Image: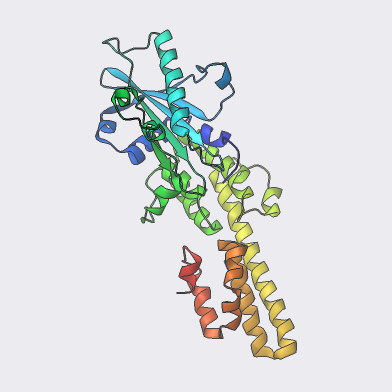
Amino acid sequence: MTNNHHDPAYKRFFSQPVMIKDLLVEYVGEDWVKELDFSTLEKQNGSYAADDYRDRHDDLIWRVRWGKEWLYVYLLLEFQSDIDHFMAVRMMTYLGLLYQDLIAQGKLTSDGQLPPVLPVVLYNGQRRWSAATDIDSLIERIPGGLSAYRPQMRYMLLDEGALLSKDNSPELHSLVHALFRLEHSRTPDDMRSIVATLSKWLVKPEQRPIRREFAIWIQRVLLRRKPFADSKLFDWEEVQDLEEVNEMLAERMNEWEREWKQEGRLEGRQEGRQEGRQEGLLAGEGKSLLLLLEQKFGKEAAEQYRPRVEQADEPTIQQWLINILTANSIEEVFR
C-alpha cells in the first residue's frame, strides 16, 4: 500500500453518497443503520479544525437523518505505512474540534444536545491494525477515585485486509466491497473480473461519475503498484471508462502470455541443446511456471519455490500450471 498519509483518490470515492451508504450498510451493519434515511446524506465542510489541523486532507464528514435528528459520520482515511499507536487520541481531538464547530453553528439536537457522531478509521495497509480503538486503554490506571475522570471515546476500525481475510464469498456485495477487492487483488485476471462486474452495475447516467472514478483510479494508482507495475500499461492514453480499462488489461494479459511462452520456449531450446530435447522442454515448462508465479505472487515468493520446480518431473509441473489458474495463494499451487 502507498506510504502517503492520504490517498486523494479514496477521498474522491468517499465523497460519493453511494459509497458512504455502502460502507455503513455492509461494514457497520448495526441495527440503527436500518433507521437511517440515506436520501438525506449530506457531505459537510471539514475545514472546522484549529490552525494546526487545517492542512489535513484525509478526513471526510457526512451527516444523515436518523428519525428527526441528524447523525454525523466522521471518516478518517488512514494510509500511513506505520500504524499510529495513539490513533484514539487523534480521533478524540478531531471529534472535539467537530463538536466545537457544531456548537458554534448551532447545529444541536431539538433538545439542545450534541448530535451523535460515528468515528470511523478506514485503514488499508498491508500490516494488520494493532493500535487501541479505545482511549481508555492508553491511559495509565491509578487506584482510587481518579478513574471516574478518565475520558471515554472509541472509534470504529475498518481494516480492509482483515475484513477481506474473513470474506470467503467470490461474489461482490457492493461498490465498497469491489473497491476493497481491487485494492488487494493480486492478478490482472482478478482485476478484470471485478471490472466486468462494476461495468454491469454502473450503467445509469447518474452513475457515470463513480464509474469514471473507478476507471481513472485503476489506471493512475492501482496499476502503478507491484505486482502490476508495467511501463507498457502507462503508454495508453488516460482512460475515461471501465470498458477501456478492461480492454487495456486484456491486451496486456495477452502480451504477458506470449512473453511467458516465448521465454519458456527459448529456455527450453537452450537447455535442449545441452541436455536433450525432453529436458529442454521440461526446463521451458518450469521457466514458464516460475514466470507465472512471479507475476501472480511476487518474485520473492516465486524464488522460494524455485528449487522445488527445478527438481519436479513433467507431470507434476503440468499439474502446477493448471493449479495456478485458480490458486489464491502460492501454497495452493503446490498442494
Task: Report x, y in % for residue 227.
Answer: 60, 56
Give whichever of 55, 320 is nearer the camera: 55
- Tell me how many marks there are: 0
Q: Quadrant of residue 274?
A: bottom right
Colour mapping used in the image: rainbow
Q: Quadrant of the C terminus?
A: bottom left
Give whichever of 128, 122 is nearer the camera: 128
Question: As displayed, is residue 158 above or below residue 324?
Answer: above
In this orientation, does residue 333 appear?
yes
Residue at point 34%, 12% (across, down): 108
Q: Quadrant of residue 269?
A: bottom right
Task: Report x, y in % for residue 285.
Answer: 61, 78
Q: Residue furthest bottom?
A: 276
Viewed as shown, does residue 19 lie left or right of 272?
left
Viewed as shown, does residue 265 lie left or right of 333?
right
Q: Residue furthest front?
A: 143
Give whichever of 104, 294 is nearer the camera: 104
Residue at point 49%, 21% (across, down): 46
In this orientation, does residue 206 appear?
no
Task: Report x, y in % for residue 309.
Answer: 58, 78
Residue at point 70%, 78% (across, down): 267
Task: Report x, y in % for residue 169.
Answer: 36, 55
Viewed as shown, does residue 255 lie left or right of 21?
right
Q: Quadrant of residue 148?
A: top left
Residue at point 40%, 10% (across, down): 103
